[in-house]
Image (cartoon, rainbow, N blue to C red):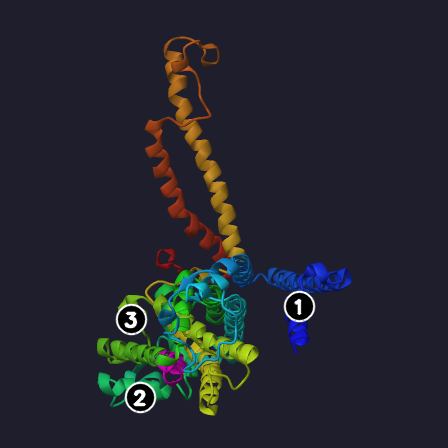
Amino acid sequence: MADEEETTTTSSETTLETTPTWAVATVVFLLIVVSIFLEYLLHLLAKYFNKKRRKSLIQALDKIKSELMLLGFISLLLTVSKKRIANICIPKNVGETFLPCNDPLNDSEEEAKCQEQGKVSLLSRQGVKELQYLMFTLAFFHCLSCVLTFSLGMAKMRRWKSWEAETTTLEYLFSNDPRRFQLIHQTSFARRHLRFWSEHKFLRWPACFVRQFYSSVSKVDYFTLRHGFITAHFSEGSNFDFQKYIKRALEKDFGVVVGISLWIWIFSVLFIFFNAHDFHNYLWLPFIPLLMLLVVGTQLQGIITRMCLDSHNRSQVVRGTFLVRPSDDFFWIGWPKLLLHLMHFILFQNSFQLAFFTWTWYEFGLTSCFHRSTKDIVIRVVMGVLVHILCGYVTLPLYALVTQMGTSMKKAVFPENVVEGLKRWRANARKQIALKSNYISARPSLETASAFGTSPSFSLDPSHSVMFDRVPESDHLAVEMVEDEERENTISREAEMEQQKRGSFGGFDLRNVS
């Protein structure tokens, strides 16, 4: 019996000194092949986005790469410092608080240093290894959930392409003829939103809460918000493609959501802390993403109704079609981007639930102390899947449409080719300004030299020599004034050129670009 225990101990402590070299070489080779294959797939994906001129998606892909690199660095730090972490000793009564399991079975060996002191390790070596798996699983599920959610949203918004094409038909132009007058209550948008509950806040919220589950974005809502956006920022009759603009804006928002910022990592630490058994987290933690998502969807529906009420209070007669007024006042604290950060938080917390469930299932089995009952497993899985479907197919399209109705529009209003052209024009304008500044600095020197009756090229006095490499400090203000004037005229001239080329940016006011 003693021989068997000795054999087991020896086999469990096998190191590379007693491992065949062919086994080590095979494992290293497989890891390299898998890593190169994944890198090649990411390279192909970036090449495809570059070919399609999807610069926002390329930036989102770069953020995913940076997050994977950060995880690799965290894993390296845990691997190097796991022995030192295990040697940090804490009292037993402190180590038995906030345990994830009510009656855990701790079969791991304590560090000899802590055991001699009658204490336990802060985090055992096995715990550090399991924590590495948790961090990687968390980031992987967050990126995967964001991609799946935005894919569902894009799939639903495909019908908007046909709605946008309908705006060029004769039937649409006839029904929205600006020479036609009608009462507000006769419009389809007013009949949808001006109800008995619209003017009462306590009745409007329940109605908007229910409305988000059926026909959350109707055709009349799309046409009305599109008309309000174009009227506020473009000239009347502009053929601006509103659907493509929303798509570009959503891709830029995706680059924000897919990243894991510092405050997201702080919340991940808090979530790990609240997974202690004393908090009974399975009764409330899985429901937080769902409740926040429903509140955001209700707020978005309420914004559309409030815009309808605002236009109704201003006038009782409509010329052409119903006109809504974009404004930041309809959003919480006057900040439309707050909804983007809330959706970022919702997606992360939901992905944390799924990642934690997958990690505990892999490490400890399906029926472990983390989720002993069947209802706990059902709640976590059902809530995670439900939030993904509801967020991607319902709330995300509603968010993409309503958040365009702020006071200022996003920079995504410019296509990528126009943005590149403006950047090139800006670089050329700076060169021209530099040449003008050199001319301004050279002119006083020439006049001074001619006053002394000498040639500036052969003047021995440094104060009268021509200097083209440096702008005098007295001329910096003039240069800045010229630069400001050139900067103000930059985008307007480019917009006029683009209008002549495309005919889609008539009446564009760049001062409203956020």
| Residue under label 1 | 10
Residue 447 percent across, percent down from the top left: 38, 17
Q: Residues within 10 Å of mark 3 (few under 14, many from 20)?
A: few
| Residue under label 2 | 207
From the viewer's perspective, is the residue at label 3 or at label 1 nearer? 1
Q: Please tell me whether mark 2 sits on a helix, a strand or a loop.
A: helix
* Front-lying residue, 204 or 350: 350
Q: Residue at x 54, y 72 (%)?
A: 144
Q: Please tell me whether mark 1 sits on a helix, a strand or a loop.
A: helix
| Residue under label 3 | 332
Separation (CA) of disc 3 from disc 1: 64 Å
Horizontal placement of 444 versus 63: left or right?
left
Q: Which quadrant of the figure has residue 1?
A: bottom right
What's the magenta region?
279-294
Q: Tell me if label 2 and label 3 are in contact, CB under 8 Å.
A: no
Q: Which amino acid does label 2 sit on?
A: Ala
* Front-lying residue, 450 or 15: 15
Q: How crowded is mark 2: few (under 14 residues within 10 Å), some or many (20 or more)?
A: some
Above/below status of 169 relative to 435: below
Separation (CA) of disc 2 from disc 1: 69 Å
Separation (CA) of disc 2 from disc 3: 19 Å
Residue 508 percent across, percent down from the top left: 40, 59
Mark 3 or mark 1, earlier in chain: 1
Q: Residue at x 48, y 80 (%)?
A: 105
Residue 422 percent across, percent down from the top left: 49, 50
